[in-house]
Amino acid sequence: MITPEVTPFAQTGGLGEVLSALPGELAELGVEVDVFMPKYRGIDCDKYGLKETDLKIKVDINARTVPAALWEFRDKRGGRYLFVKCDEYFDREYLYGTPEADYEDNAERFVFLCRSAIEMGLAASTHYDVFHSHDWQASLAPVYLRTLYAGEPLLETSASVMTIHNLGYQGIFWHLDMPLVGVGWEFFTPKHMEFHGKLNFLKSGIVFADEVNTVSPGYRDEILTPEFGFGLEGILQEKGPHLTGILNGVDYRTWNPETDPLIAANFTSEDFTGKALCKADLQRISHLPIRRDVPVIGMVSRLSDQKGIDILGGAIPALMEHDLQLVLLGTGDARYHVSFREFAERYPDKIGVFLNYDYGLAHAIFAGADVLLVPSRYEPCGLNQLYSLRYGTPPIVHETGGLSDSVDDYDENTGKGTGFKFGWYEAGGLRQAIQRALKVYAQPKALANLRHNGMQQEFSWDISAAAYEKVYANALKS
């Protein structure tokens, strides 16, 4: 597996958590997995137990030869993580760019990542059955297997899989980066790597990969349409049966209210006593009045339009007319930092805002909130709604992608369902869904039933890992 991030070593979103859990699940199925990623500045070797290997590689890039070293970490489940150390590209404060802009040499940095992953296998004389690329940063590996490295004995029977975690991020660069990539101009065509006159890394990976998948069945269908295809719906349609959707899973060893050491008190689906203590702790941390009777709405999110922050901002003035509290954790667009800081100042007894990412506080919100907001405009899979279900915190979700796949709308007549969906992507649609949730909150028996329903859901990674094993088999058949 080739990836730009893995939790806990380096993370900006859900991709890192996937790469933390999936390799171990595959290892338990008998799949030997190496995970290859950059050794960023922020990765503390002593903290995580990384060790330098004897393996050295050289990558020809941009008319010069760049040397690199390999570091290694082995987890308890059998997965091996390899880190390519090249300070020229990865010894930086951030992964992909500063808060102001992306790094100008990102094309070169991730060309290097893909080339070095393949060179590592050759230097170690290791045959990999499958090269599995995650997102645009790793998407040139399928290209290289069929171009620059075609005919290499160790690679002749290697297959490639391309996983799209979010089609909105494609790695688009100017056309003059083609020589940097290292393949011929004959591939700069609409059928291959060209995209409206520019070079598109993700498109290139999709075209050349034997199998392509994304992270939920619903999102797989959505990206075939102009609305969610971001201009790539045509080439995705051409993949036909070689494009699948596999819902992400949850590592319940980490996300489990019965054993979670990061929350104020543990609890089960049969005894919610501990959840009440978690709620009081969350109110204390958020400097909100500690009231058991007031509903607490939580949200852990990147602050961007994709995540529904725009419609949440539009809904807040009307929501503040209700007796409720809101706790928001996340970072993102500067304008949302400003607006939500202002909301917190305007409603100090109702809104707590944390404009950073705090892993422990995220656990506290999932455990202590009464409902969780996941109002994304589009969502390939989403993990937060899966976490919140296990913590007895019914999610409020926009009916899209993986959110729709993983949450069943609550029916007050039958008592069935696990959360609240809204299809109208406007502040009014979100507000109506929250009002439905508040109505259920006011009915203790209905609320307990809804919580119990959610906590019984099963989204274990072993289910998803078995599906990935089938994708690998299909890729090898190709």
Image (cartoon, rainbow, N blue to C red):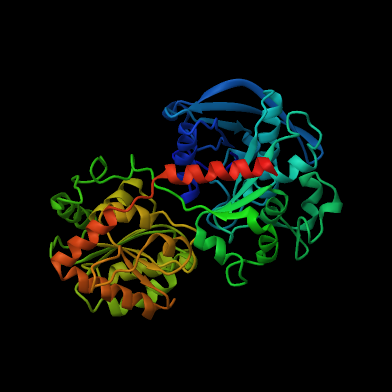
From the top left corner, tell me how far across and down residue 458 is, in percent.
Answer: 35, 50
Residue 467, above or below 81 = below
The percent coordinates of residue 67 (x first, y second) are 70, 29
Q: Is residue 338 visible to the viewer in this orientation of the structure?
A: yes
Q: Where is residue 354 in the image (x, y as percent from the top left)?
A: 34, 57
- 130 relative position to 312: left or right: right
> Which quadrant of the structure image shows residue 389?
bottom left
Residue 10 visible somewhere in the drawing: no
Residue 302, x across and y down, in percent: 44, 59
In the displayed structure, 336 sits above or below 387; it is: below
Residue visible at 69% across and 65% down? 234
Q: In the rendered image, which quarter contains the N terminus? A: top right
Tell which of 384 and 236 is nearer to you. Answer: 236
Left/right of residue 82 with respect to residue 290 in the rendered view: right
Residue at (24, 40) in percent of width and height: 259
In the rendered image, the vertical position of residue 105 relative to residue 419, given as above or below: above
| Viewer-closest of 330 and 167 | 167
Task: Tell me where residue 55 sits by quadrant.
Answer: top right
Quadrant containing the C terminus is: top right
In depth, the one of 338 and 304 nearer the eye is 304
Residue in the picture at 63% in, 66% down: 230
Number of callouts in the render? 0
Corner quadrant of residue 345: bottom left
